Image: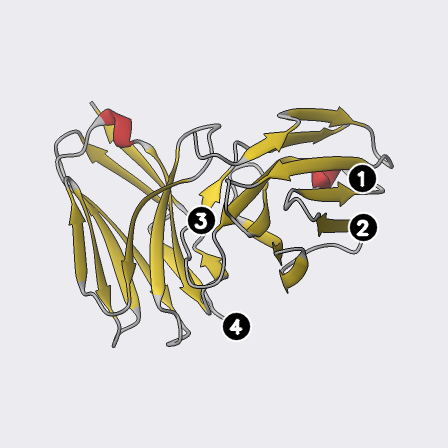
Amino acid sequence: GENVEQHPSTLSVQEGDSAVIKCTYSDSASNYFPWYKQELGKRPQLIIDIRSNVGEKKDQRIAVTLNKTAKHFSLHITETQPEDSAVYFCAAVYNFNKFYFGSGTKLNVKP
Amino acid sequence: DSGVTQTPKHLITATGQRVTLRCSPRSGDLSVYWYQQSLDQGLQFLIQYYNGEERAKGNILERFSAQQFPDLHSELNLSSLELGDSALYFCASSVGVGNEKLFFGSGTQLSVL
């Protein structure tokens, strides 16, 4: 089955700096890669996603890049703000419904 | 609000007991997923249903079972509870095959004492 590895497990940045979280996957059949943000005690919420036929997608301060050949994808957050502090999960999805989540990255944005 | 409703929000019970967690998917979603999240851990996939039928199984213990009813709501049954079953249980739903966007409920916090 699919194996998704996510790094780093914790990330601390100064407000205004950029943050990058990386994930690798093993199954080349995976074709959809969402990112979820989970604030403390809350539900995971979809923040951005990318399909395998796209290399990059941007939504305001967040962007996701995908390298299919290397089987890795990354989340980029620019101009970080304290409200960006949360746990971020990546996932690789294949066959439309098999979700494999990474282990999560705890992002701390220091004011 | 994601549109996925989970009840109850909190559940406190004793070891050896049995509990039922309930999930109502978003209107129009046919697929329901159950995840377990222990303290400071990731999302462990338990089971998925699509339009009433089991579609995929993850690391679900034999003491746990689930089902999806004709009205598409789902229940997760946890029996012979152990201390280690204490966790946040999330339900998520999606339209189904061909649309992968997954929306999570607020979760049920289970505490086994």
Q: Earlier in the sequence, mark 3 or mark 1?
A: 1
Q: Report the residue marked by disc 1.
A: B81
In-image side of A61 versus A41 (left or right) = left
Distance between mark 3 and mark 1 Cα atoms: 28 Å
Q: Secondary structure at mark 4?
A: loop
Q: Is residue B82 above or below residue A31?
A: above
Q: Report the residue marked by disc 3.
A: B102
Q: Residues within 10 Å of mark 1 (few under 14, many from 20)?
A: many
Badges 3 and 1: C-beta atoms under 8 Å apart?
no
Q: Nearer the viewer, mark 2 or mark 3?
A: 3
Viewer-proximal residue among A81 and A43 = A43
In-image side of A76 versus B111 (left or right) = left
Q: Which three-letter amino acid code belongs to the residue tagged 4?
A: Gly
Chain identity of mark 1: B
Q: Which three-letter amino acid code belongs to the residue tagged 2?
A: Arg
Q: Residues within 10 Å of mark 4 (few under 14, many from 20)?
A: few
Q: Which three-letter amino acid code belongs to the residue tagged 1?
A: Leu
Q: Which three-letter amino acid code belongs to the residue tagged 3?
A: Leu
Chain identity of mark 4: A
Q: Is residue B48 above or below residue B81?
A: below
x and y, in percent, of residue B3 in the image: 48, 34
Badges 2 and 1: C-beta atoms under 8 Å apart?
yes
Q: Residues within 10 Å of mark 2 (few under 14, many from 20)?
A: few
In-image side of B12 versus A18 (left or right) = right
Give me the residue at 57% from left, 40% from top: B90
Q: Report the residue marked by disc 4.
A: A1
Viewer-proximal residue among B52 and A43 = B52
Distance between mark 2 and mark 3 Cα atoms: 26 Å
Marks 3, 4 in one chain: no
x and y, in percent, of residue A57 in the image: 18, 55
Distance between mark 2 and mark 1 Cα atoms: 8 Å
Q: Which mark is residue B63?
A: 2
